[in-house]
Image: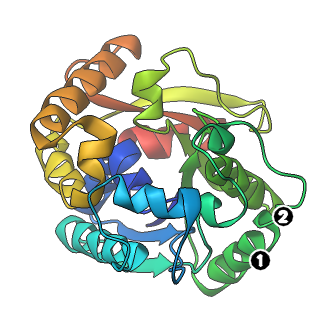
Amino acid sequence: MHALFLSPHLDDVAFSVGGTLLRLVQRGWQVSLCTVFTGSVQHPVGFALRCQTDKGLPPEVDYMALRREEEHQFARLAAVTRLHCLPYPEAPHRGYESAAALFNGVLPHDNIWRPVASDLRRLISSVRFDVVFAPQGLGNHVDHLHLIRAVLQANLAEKTCWYRDTPYAMRQPQARPDPRLPAELREVGVDISATLEDKLAGCCAYESQIGFQFGGTERLRTALPTFHQQEAARLGLAGYAEGLLVPSHLVNLICEA
């Protein structure tokens, strides 16, 4: 069996659904990870530059190269079979000039989902995937919304399980999935009790992001287990869980994997 995990940014899969990824690897699945918005931009300015300097990185650092290396480290730790880093620039390089703008809807000129969908079609034509994992769009980040549209445009919905974007799911417990997701989906919990510690270790590979997203490594190691314990209770499971919206015909495959 082969699963494709789609990530808007260099950390989203690890934070959101890393326990499920590791569970599949432990059960002998091949796992591919494709991250979309990973392109380096030389000499960033304005808000784009502040997105790295506010994390303590000087302007001369190639921020995305550093983050791609963090992704490679996670992939090695998680025994990912194939890693694909697509060269698209993150939203701050595409005209979104403030933190608020990232969560306030897609700009009219921003059609980056079109080439992303083309790349996804090429990827799935070269490798047969049994299941795909993609974000639900919790938090409304424009890059997450573009990936959802690309997944739908690439006709992947029938085999896609939609994960809860984290840490947005932690910050906004009442956030709703993007309304474009298919109507007939079932929410299931994947027990990650056996892979939680490995997930936390994998998340720690993203050193440049942990302070900003969680307030440091120690807080991450407290906050994520607490959240996954709450998710398990919400979904009727013991231990720790990650929640997914799953097409009915894939429920048994996901729950038994």
Could you tell me the amino acid type at mark 2? Asn
State whether residue 129 is above or below residue 92: below
User: In the rendered picture of this protein, how many numbered marks are placed on residues?
Assistant: 2
At horizontal 20% and vertical 56% (from top left) the residue drawn is 202
Residue beneath disc 1: 118
Looking at the image, is mark 2 or mark 1 earlier in the sequence?
A: 2
At horizontal 39% and vertical 12% (from top left) the residue drawn is 234
Question: Which quarter shows the N terminus?
Answer: bottom left
Q: Which mark is residue 111?
A: 2
The crowd level at tag 2 (other Cα within 10 Å; few <14, some 14-19, many 20+) is few
At horizontal 62% and vertical 39% (from top left) the residue drawn is 137
- Determine the image quadrant of residue 16: top left
Q: Which mark is residue 175?
A: none
Q: Is residue 154 visible?
A: no
CA gap between label 2 and label 1 equals 12 Å
Element at label 2: loop
Please tell me which residue lies in front, 78 or 3.
78
At horizontal 54% and vertical 78% (from top left) the residue drawn is 39
State whether residue 177 is above or below residue 113: above
Instruction: Give the image location of residue 242, x and y in percent.
Output: 37, 33
Q: Which is closer to the viewer, label 2 or label 1?
A: 2
User: In the image, is 1 to the left or to the right of 213?
Assistant: right
- Determine the image quadrant of residue 118: bottom right
Element at label 1: helix
Instruction: Give the image location of residue 206, x and y in percent.
Output: 26, 59
